[in-house]
Amino acid sequence: MARSLRFNGTGSGGGGCPSVHEDLNTGEVIVHGPPLTDPQDVSQLQHLSAGEVPIVVPRDLLVDFAPKTPRTPRIIDLEAFGQLFQTFEHTAWRLETRRRFASDEASDTYAQFLSGDPVEWDYDDDWCRNVRAQTDRGARFERVRVVDDPPTPGQLFLLDNAKRNCAMGEDIRNLWRSDGRQLQLPEEDFWIFDSRLVALLNFSDDDVLVDVELITEPAAVNRYAQARDAAWHYAIRYDVFAANL
């Protein structure tokens, strides 16, 4: 059976070697780099079997990118989560993979959308005011929303909502779920703040946001950042995406 390998990271500049990969099926780690070839160095190795090749990797590569033992989750409540949007410095980036949000479906705007009436979006609520304030100082709000084929009602609602958020300064793009799977994007909703902190959103079985897990381990943050870069590269502006439904 073919391995399912995920690139965790590299300690090099542009050469891409040495590097660390992780087998998503077995948890095994694959490291490649320059071989250790000096006979005097090789003679010092113990238990080197026939067919094995010793390689040289920087210690920092393993510290930063090798999988770690399971971490103790750092959970914050929704109030503390809201503060992250006030205190980040440069970028707030979101991947949305869910098919529905209970909070959306409880809103008046969702009822308007389902009825076919024009949605009366509020352009001056707390979220909009903060997005305007942050983008006015040069910060960026960006999202990729994963969409099923055909889209769910909740996804179509958010596609309509995007025009309001983008008018405030966000940059929202969409990606078909089938494309997301080809890119091996995680089936998770998360925010990345300043490329150093991941806020993983935890939902109940009835699609209510319950709390948020903060992730700061560099190797783990790097994996989410790789997903961000892949999603952002292939995603389509919300208005172009909507025009082609």
Image (spheres, helix red, strand yellow):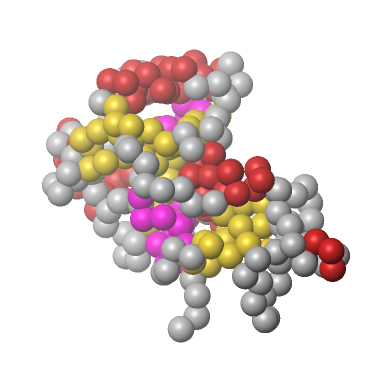
User: Could you tell me which residue is drawn at 41 percent across and 69 percent down?
Assistant: 25
Give the vertical position of 3 relative to 170 (above or below).
Answer: below
Residue under the image location 27 percent in, 53 percent down: 99
Residue positioned 47% across, 34% down in the render: 216
Relative to 181, is 77 on the left or the right?
A: left
Residue 36, percent from left and from top: 78, 64
Where, quadrant-wise, is the C terminus in this rendering? bottom left
The magenta stretch spans residue 78: no
Residue 173 vs residue 203: left or right? right
Residue 110 visible, this orientation: no
Horizontal and vertical percent position of residue 197: 48, 32
Front residue of 61/211: it is: 61
Q: Is residue 158 visible?
A: yes
**Residue reaching furthest to the bottom:** 1
Please provide percent x and percent y for residue 89.
55, 21
Q: Which residues are magenta?
A: 165-188
Tell me if residue 96 comes above or below residue 109 in the rendering.
below
Residue 191: percent from left, percent from top: 43, 37
Residue ID at (36%, 55%): 187
Question: Toward the viewer: 139 or 29?
Answer: 29
Dividing the picture into quadrants, the one containing residue 49 is: bottom right
Front residue (pair 138, 95): 95
Q: Is residue 25 above or below residue 8?
A: below
